[in-house]
């Protein structure tokens, strides 16, 4: 894992000092509210419905035990004893007081953490595959790239006042767990014909009110050219992105309105200027890259073997269910990747109490090479675990209600904060998630249904990623009444697809019955237990599912 | 209207600014006002006729001006660059980093955000991008020209502490010829380097001092830093550097780097260090590092100069190493072989190292078998010509060039840029 050195810690301290001064200058009137706002946002501080919210960066979702424990301390001391993990692989505290925020930032700095650029119209916290460095299907570890980008983009002088926020995601595996096609820039690590490492560069993807699929701007970019190329894209965006309408300001709109070919020509020209000019110093120092890479060397794995069943026998049913759903294949024999579900039935998706955080910290230190990941699906990952330690880990997780065996199942729901916290919300999303999870609480039923991704957003901004859900739910406001629109067939993986809207919306009470009807239809229509909802939907199209959703409406007949 | 510079608020006689249409008239010393949506090609043909470009920022939240500044600099604009309009003090360092020289603000803003707010925002520490950038990849000549042009434009003001630079004190100076000297300076406690690396050094004699690459001639364990230097009569740095005395200040950038390091070589039995002129400097570091003798059974250092006097520094270091209480045992004459050759004066061995390698004279003289790619490794430091020719010979012996990210069987570093 990246070891922060003196440089990083000085930087973070300096930044906290600056922010303290900025708060003082806001209070003295040297900064107007308008001027203070972007500075506050770039230090992670939002104004929400009830209070400020502090969004803490977890660079590419990677944490160690000490850091997790400090988050628990912050939750206890300055918040209400819990934190909320988000779809951006970050953690949010929902109740800090403005005057405490600089102290919180100092406490974060004690463990080399910060809230820099987690918000505002700048390059946001870079995200990456949460199984990086562990997954059996990985071609190359995306974290050194994400770290390089983190360093390069931190306090970038030119790109702190962009037309709009800017998000970059990196994946090193053909199975895209980083949703690269829904980011302003998505990077897929690939190799050219000679085996040299590089990237496929995707731009202009995004969800929000105008969902768009990212497009390939450069099929192959040599590794060392990355920073210069990203700089070129950002410069073109910064100069030409729309600033007249905040809903049209993301790069996806620029790409859409200008056309990919024209944007590509602009970017390539800018890129060659950068490489030619003395600012060729923008290219990274190979030695520095090598240094960063060396930090991500795999931990010292033990040569162990054996499968879960060999270890425990077929005894404990609950444990076996958990091993069926919450494990992913590790590249090292004898090891596995554990996903800890933050989706206990009826709980708030993504919330973790300080006690739970401490237990996860302990487990990572004791059994997991001191590594923890936050997934964009709002769960916590222990990436390097020996299979034979699983029973002990399971027992410990169960003690604090973290052993729910539902990863990838219908109750593993993503939900944005919605009306309960977010000032932009037009509807509640957490209570809807809780209702659905409770309805499908029976684990046999959930297992029968199989893989299912439900995602809920509380407004059109789509923080809950509902566009890429198998069943997406978008909460709107229709004349003062919450109304939930359903989309079907979205997919966030390498087979990226944006879900299609299925007719008019439902009231809050009608959502669960509607989902139940959909599920029943699927179970009847599928070719067998191996055909997932998504595959069945792709095979059959929307019509039969629409009929299930709206049984009283006659299907359109061919005239 | 105050002008904010790195040293504080300044006032300026009223200049008259004109729009880009003034470019059509063939006048010189232009002072232009431009909007952030201006295309650089409109201006680039006329750069030499422009003294000052003032980029207008409508709102501090509109960052286009920063990109325009960077574009102008990348396109080769070396005149004064000013940001004007609504910028806040928290953006001052951003403006400087994007190539602006100063910022013009309204009187009202100057009252609300007085001078010390702006000064406090000036870069206090190196940025991530400075840390990531590859010093050896910059084009030294272009950098040169830029430095000269900029210092000519600026009123000569004294050096102000720079964020990414250590200020160190000279502790010893030794002159060998009228073209060569060495000096030692104190070492910052946080300064780390690997034996064989180089660092940028300069003198505190200008607001933007000239920095040049210098090999760290001492080993990494030394608690001072040592350098071995040329004196170029009108060299921007060395015309001044050659006059340093004990107690003077020398500036050292915080980051050392380089390829003449153990990490860039695969393991082997014999290590050949080929140098000409001041190119011996990285090797006087390496031969004084015990790690070298852990990695290699034998080390052969060759140095080619014109005259006997130019060999003195190297001979002294080797003698000192052999006499050193700890190194003496591990770097005896059987372990560390020093072979010198001259191209002008008379000497036991004369001629270029390339010739002596090709005709086998070197191996006869030191009584060793020729280079065997299986077990021998080499490092090269000298002029471009020397590197090209000696590099070609190394390749003939079957050696393959390495780097930090991909270690090989030989590595090179330029001793200077021609
Ligand atoms: C990686 C690297 C390491 C270096 N290490 C050293 C070192 O340890 N000691 C050192 O003296 N210089 C070293 N140099 C050269 C150094 O950076 C400067 O070029 C030198 O100090 C002269 O600086 P200047 O500004 O006075 O003149 P410059 O304008 O830099 O040079 C003027 C001209 O003098 C000639 N010249 C410059 N340096 C040398 C030299 N060392 N030997 C022969 N001719 C030269 C070149 O033809 C050059 O064009 C190194 C250069 C590089 C790239
Ligand atoms: S989707 Fe809307 S309601 Fe939900 S968090 Fe985002 S902005 Fe808030």
Image (cartoon, coloured by chain):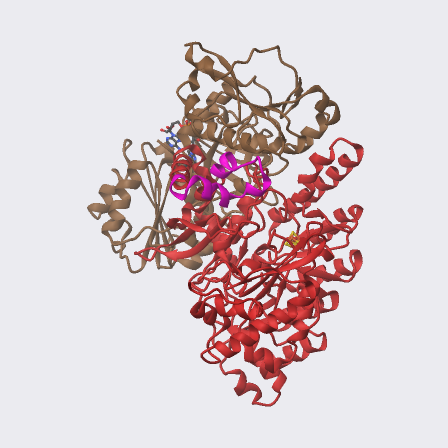
Q: Colour of chain A?
A: red
Residue A440 as seen in the image, left or right of residue B43: right
Q: Which residues are magenta?
A: A235-262
User: The chain drawn brown is chain what?
Assistant: B
Residue A105: horizontal and vertical position, in percent? 72, 49
Q: Residue furthest front?
A: A559
Q: Is residue A480 above or below residue A177?
A: above
Q: Main secondary structure of the magenta part?
A: helix
Q: Quadrant of residue B295?
A: bottom left
Question: Horizontal and vertical percent for residue B263?
Answer: 43, 54
Q: Where's residue A492, x and y in %?
A: 50, 61
Rendered image quadrant of residue B4: top right
- Look at the image and tell me in which quarter the C terminus of chain A lies: bottom left
Identify the residue at horizontal 48%, vertical 47% (top origin). A204
Q: Is residue B183 left or right of residue A558?
A: right
- Number of numbered discs overlaid on the protein picture: 0
Residue in front for this viewpoint, B296 or A342: A342
Q: Is residue B287 magenta?
A: no
Q: Nearer the viewer, residue B295 or B402?
A: B402
Examine the structure image and report whether residue A245 is included in the region drawn in magenta. Answer: yes
Q: Could you say which is closer to the camera, residue A317 or residue B254?
A: A317
- Judge left or right: residue B125 versus residue B400: right
Q: Estimate the x, y position of residue B239 in percent, counting from the top left.
A: 46, 23
Which quarter is ligand 1 in?
A: top left
């Amino acid at each position: 894992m990246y070891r922060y050195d003196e440089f990083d810690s000085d930087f973070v301290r300096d930044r906290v000092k600056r922010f303290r001064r900025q708060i003082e200058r806001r209070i003295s009137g040297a900064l107007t509210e308008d001027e203070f706002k972007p500075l506050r946002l770039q230090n992670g501080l939002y104004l929400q419905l009830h209070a400020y919210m502090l969004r803490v960066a977890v660079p590419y979702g990677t944490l160690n035990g000490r850091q997790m424990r400090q988050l628990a301390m912050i939750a206890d001391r300055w918040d209400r004893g819990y934190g909320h993990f988000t779809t951006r692989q970050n953690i949010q505290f929902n109740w800090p007081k403005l005057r405490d925020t600089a102290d919180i930032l100092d406490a974060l700095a004690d463990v080399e953490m910060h809230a820099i650029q987690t918000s505002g119209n700048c390059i946001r916290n870079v995200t990456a595959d949460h199984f990086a460095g562990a997954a059996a299907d990985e071609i190359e570890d995306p974290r050194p790239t994400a770290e390089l980008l983190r360093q390069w983009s931190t306090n970038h002088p030119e790109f702190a006042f962009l037309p709009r926020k800017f998000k970059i995601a990196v994946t090193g595996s053909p199975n895209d767990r980083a949703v690269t096609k829904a980011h302003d820039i998505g990077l897929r690590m690939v190799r050219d014909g000679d085996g040299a490492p590089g990237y496929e560069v995707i731009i202009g993807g995004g969800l929000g009110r105008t969902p768009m699929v990212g497009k390939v701007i450069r099929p192959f970019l040599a590794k060392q050219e990355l920073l210069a190329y990203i700089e070129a894209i950002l410069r073109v965006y910064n100069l030409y992105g729309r600033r007249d309408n905040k809903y049209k300001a993301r790069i996806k709109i620029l790409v859409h309105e200008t056309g990919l070919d024209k944007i590509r020509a602009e970017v390539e020209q800018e890129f060659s200027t950068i490489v030619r000019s003395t600012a060729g110093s923008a290219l990274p120092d190979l030695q520095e890259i090598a240094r960063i890479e060396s930090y991500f060397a795999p931990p010292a794995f033990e040569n162990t073997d054996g499968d879960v069943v060999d270890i425990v026998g077929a005894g404990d049913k609950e444990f076996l269910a958990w091993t069926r759903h919450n494990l992913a294949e590790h590249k090292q024999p004898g090891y596995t990747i554990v996903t800890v579900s933050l989706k206990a039935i009826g709980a708030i998706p993504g919330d973790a109490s300080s006690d739970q955080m401490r237990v996860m910290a302990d487990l990572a230190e004791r059994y997991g090479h001191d590594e923890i990941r936050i997934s964009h699906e709002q769960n916590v990952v222990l990436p390097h675990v020996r299979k034979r330690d699983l029973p002990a880990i399971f027992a410990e997780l169960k003690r604090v209600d973290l052993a729910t065996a539902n990863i990838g199942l219908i109750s593993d729901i993503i939900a944005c904060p919605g009306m309960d916290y977010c000032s932009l919300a037009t509807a509640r999303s957490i209570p809807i998630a809780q209702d659905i999870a409770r309805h499908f609480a029976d684990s046999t039923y959930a297992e029968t249904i199989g893989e299912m991704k439900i995602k809920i957003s509380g407004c059109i901004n789509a923080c809950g990623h509902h566009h890429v859900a198998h069943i997406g739910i978008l909460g709107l406001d229709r004349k003062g009444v919450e109304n939930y629109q359903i989309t079907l067939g979205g997919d966030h993986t390498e087979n990226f697809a944006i879900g299609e809207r299925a007719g008019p919306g439902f009231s809050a009470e009608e959502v669960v019955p509607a989902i139940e009807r959909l599920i029943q239809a699927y179970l009847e229509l599928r070719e067998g237990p191996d055909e997932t909802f998504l595959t069945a939907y792709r095979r059959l199209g929307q019509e039969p599912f629409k009929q299930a959703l709206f049984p009283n409406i006659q299907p359109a007949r061919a005239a | 209207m105050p002008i904010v510079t790195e040293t504080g608020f300044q006032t300026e006689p009223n200049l008259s600014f004109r729009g880009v249409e003034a470019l059509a008239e063939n006048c010189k010393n232009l002072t232009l006002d431009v909007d952030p949506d201006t295309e650089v090609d409109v201006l680039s043909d006329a750069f030499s006729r422009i003294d000052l470009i003032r980029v207008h920022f409508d709102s501090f939240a509109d960052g286009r001006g920063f990109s325009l500044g960077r574009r102008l600099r990348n396109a080769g604009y070396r005149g004064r660059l000013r940001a004007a309009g609504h910028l806040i003090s928290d953006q001052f360092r951003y403006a400087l980093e994007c190539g602006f020289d100063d910022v013009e603000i309204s009187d009202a803003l100057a009252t609300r955000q007085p001078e010390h707010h702006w000064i406090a925002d000036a870069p206090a520490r190196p940025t991530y991008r400075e840390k990531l950038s590859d010093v050896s990849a910059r084009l030294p000549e272009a950098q040169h020209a830029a430095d000269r042009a900029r210092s000519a434009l600026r009123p000569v003001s004294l050096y102000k502490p720079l964020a990414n630079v250590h200020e160190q004190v000279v502790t010893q100076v030794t002159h060998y010829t009228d073209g060569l000297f060495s000096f030692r300076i104190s070492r910052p406690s946080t300064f780390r380097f690997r034996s064989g690396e180089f660092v940028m050094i300069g003198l505190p004699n200008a607001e933007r001092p000239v920095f040049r690459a210098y090999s760290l001639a001492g080993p990494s364990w030394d608690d001072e830093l040592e350098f071995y230097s040329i004196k170029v009569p009108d060299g921007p740095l060395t015309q001044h550097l050659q006059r340093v005395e004990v107690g003077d200040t020398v500036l050292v950038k915080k980051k050392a780097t380089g390829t003449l390091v153990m990490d860039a070589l695969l393991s082997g039995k014999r290590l050949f260090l080929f140098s000409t002129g001041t190119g011996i400097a990285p090797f006087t570091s390496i031969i004084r590092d015990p790690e070298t003798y852990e990695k290699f059974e034998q080390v052969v250092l060759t140095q080619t100069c014109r005259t006997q006097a130019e060999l003195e520094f190297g001979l002294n270091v080797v003698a000192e190493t052999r006499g050193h209480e700890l190194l003496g045992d591990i770097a005896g004459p059987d372990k560390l072989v020093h072979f010198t050759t001259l191209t002008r004066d008379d000497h036991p061995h004369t001629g270029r190292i390339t010739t002596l390698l090709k005709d086998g004279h070197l191996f006869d003289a030191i009584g060793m078998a020729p280079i065997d790619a299986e077990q021998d490794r080499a490092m090269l430091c000298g002029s471009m010509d020397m590197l090209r020719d000696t590099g070609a010979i190394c390749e003939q012996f079957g050696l393959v060039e390495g780097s930090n990210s991909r270690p090989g069987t030989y590595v090179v570093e330029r001793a200077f840029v021609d």
